[in-house]
Image (spheres, rainbow, N blue to C red):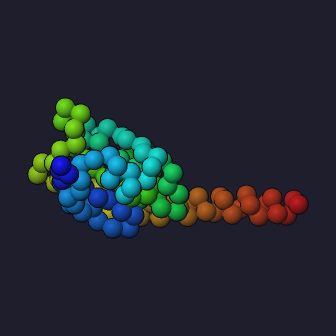
Amino acid sequence: MNRKIKALLVMPGKEAQLVKIPANIKFIKSFIGENLQKVRLNNDVILIANRDSKFEDANRLLGDSLILGTFLIVNFKNNHRVNLNNRQIRKYTNTFLLRKHSRKIELLKKEYFKNYYSSTNQNLIAA
């Protein structure tokens, strides 16, 4: 039996969207990536992201942490993935609104690349 659940899908540069996905971890790994990182957002809700995502795929901020790549917001009850309820959908759709994050992420990217290229150029000049 391939039970489906309601989850939020958050992709870089796009608004969070409600999706129905198979509840099994095999599907989630095929979709997000094999090396999963799970972050507990509250007692029941977990953010699932790929540890191997690249900085260029900076997506959203969570406190002081930068979330890279596409991620899912999933509800857990009794160690089973279950549907997000309407309150959770509203809360996390609002938490991850693109307009709340895009400007800060662009500034972080500019700073990162400025530092990266200035250190790379210094190494080239020294060589």
| 102, above or below 73, in the image | below
Q: How many marks?
A: 0
Instruction: Farthest residue to the left: give it.
Output: 86
Image side of residue 15 versus residue 110, left or right: left
For this view, does 64 lie left or right of residue 117? left
Image quadrant holding the C terminus, namely: bottom right
**In the image as oriented, which residue stretches furthest toward the bottom?**
14
In which quarter of the view is residue 118 placed? Answer: bottom right
Nearest the eye: 30 or 8: 30
x 43%, y 58%: residue: 69
Decide which of 35, 8 is in the foreground and name it: 35
Give the image location of residue 83, x and y in percent: 16, 48
- Toward the front, the furthest residue is 1
Residue ID at (43%, 53%):
33
- Visible residue check, residue 109: yes
Image position of 117 (left or right of 41): right
The correct choice, above or below, for 33 with respect to 109 in the image is: above
Quadrant position of residue 104? bottom left
Give left or right: position of 82 versus 103: left
Decide if residue 99 is in sight here.
Answer: no
Q: Position of residue 31 (x, y in %)?
A: 37, 57
Q: Position of residue 44 (x, y in %)?
A: 22, 37
Give the residue at x 36% y 54%. Answer: 71
Q: Residue furthest right?
A: 127
> Residue 65: x, y in percent?
44, 46
Residue at image position (39%, 55%) is 30
